[in-house]
Image (spheres, rainbow, N blue to C red):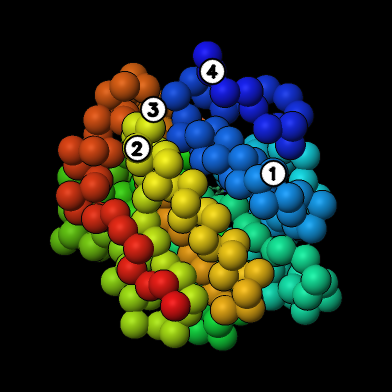
Amino acid sequence: MAKSAPSIMKCENMFCAGCGHSLFDRLLGEVLTEMDIVGESISCSDIGCNHMYQYSMAVDTVVPPHGKMGAAMAAMKKVRPDKYIFSIAGDGGAYAIGLGETLSAATRNDNVTFFVMNNTVYAMTGGQMAPTTMPGQYSSSSIKGRTAEEHGRTFDVVKLMQNLEIAYLARCTVTNAAEMAKTKRCIKKALEKQRDGKGFSLVEVLVPCPTNWGLTPPEAMRHIENDLVPYLPLGEYIDR
Ligand SMILES: Cc1ncc(C[n+]2csc(CCOP(=O)(O)OP(=O)(O)O)c2C)c(N)n1
Ligand code: SF4
């Protein structure tokens, strides 16, 4: 029998069928419920498909301008140090328009938690190429496929952050039950770092966007396993 959704999930989500954002949201909802911190949390929602969690998840939420999650979380934590402050953003918000704010929060080791949904495109605006778009990947703005020569190299947050003095850095995915269980553990650990005052945590989740990838939901999951994971290995990179 399927496990029923935690009560924090107040209605059906608005994502496309097979969207990975919904799988992450379910796991986060379970962790917040199991840790009994729903009322102790304020989420910080970026713009993009990822932001639709706030319509189905009953958690207090602030919506800053696109990409400003690092700055907004820092301000929120200063005003409400008693609350868990976390953000859900896409790779576009966190690593492109918001890279400065993301990096500033990390280098300050702000005691906040950042969940970044990496679907390798700007999904909400039509699947344009992002810094995370894979080598050779077709997108609505790289119609012959991304090349390093023409478009630059693919962004990897682990390469950027692995030497920073932050509390936690992990990359995970949602392609099967075993990976989802690992992702759930990473979500919990990241929030526990904040509870214990250890500082900045970032969990990147490789998620499918079947709609913009032009793939069926099962094909999109296989694309992550076969093409993304070998290039962007999963694991816990910082845990202190
Ligand atoms: C300052 C600003 N610039 C651009 C936009 C347009 N915009 C809205 S969502 C988005 C892309 C979101 O992509 P990502 O952050 O990867 O999230 P996803 O949709 O993939 O979940 C953009 C460029 C905006 N809303 N505000
Ligand atoms: S366009 Fe992609 S990221 Fe957006 S809801 Fe649909 S599957 Fe999810």
Q: CA distance from mark 4 to mark 2?
A: 16 Å
Q: CA distance from mark 4 to mark 3?
A: 24 Å
Residue at image location 70% in from the left, 69% down from the top: 72
Residue 68 in view, yes or no: no
Residue at mark 3: C-beta within 8 A of ligand 2: yes
Residue at image location 39% in from the left, 61% down from the top: 170
Mark 1 = which residue?
33
Residue 199 in view, yes or no: yes
| Among the two numbered marks 4 and 3 on one chain, the one whose residue lies closer to the N terminus | 4
Q: CA distance from mark 3 to mark 2?
A: 21 Å
Residue at mark 2: C-beta within 8 A of ligand 2: no
Mark 4 = which residue?
2
Q: CA distance from mark 4 to mark 1?
A: 18 Å
Mark 2 = which residue?
178
- Three-letter amino acid code of the residue under disc 3: Pro
Residue 231 placement, left or right of 13:
left
Which quadrant does the C terminus fall into?
bottom left
Up the image or down, 44 lies above or below 101; here it is above
Mark 3 = which residue?
210
- Three-letter amino acid code of the residue under disc 1: Thr
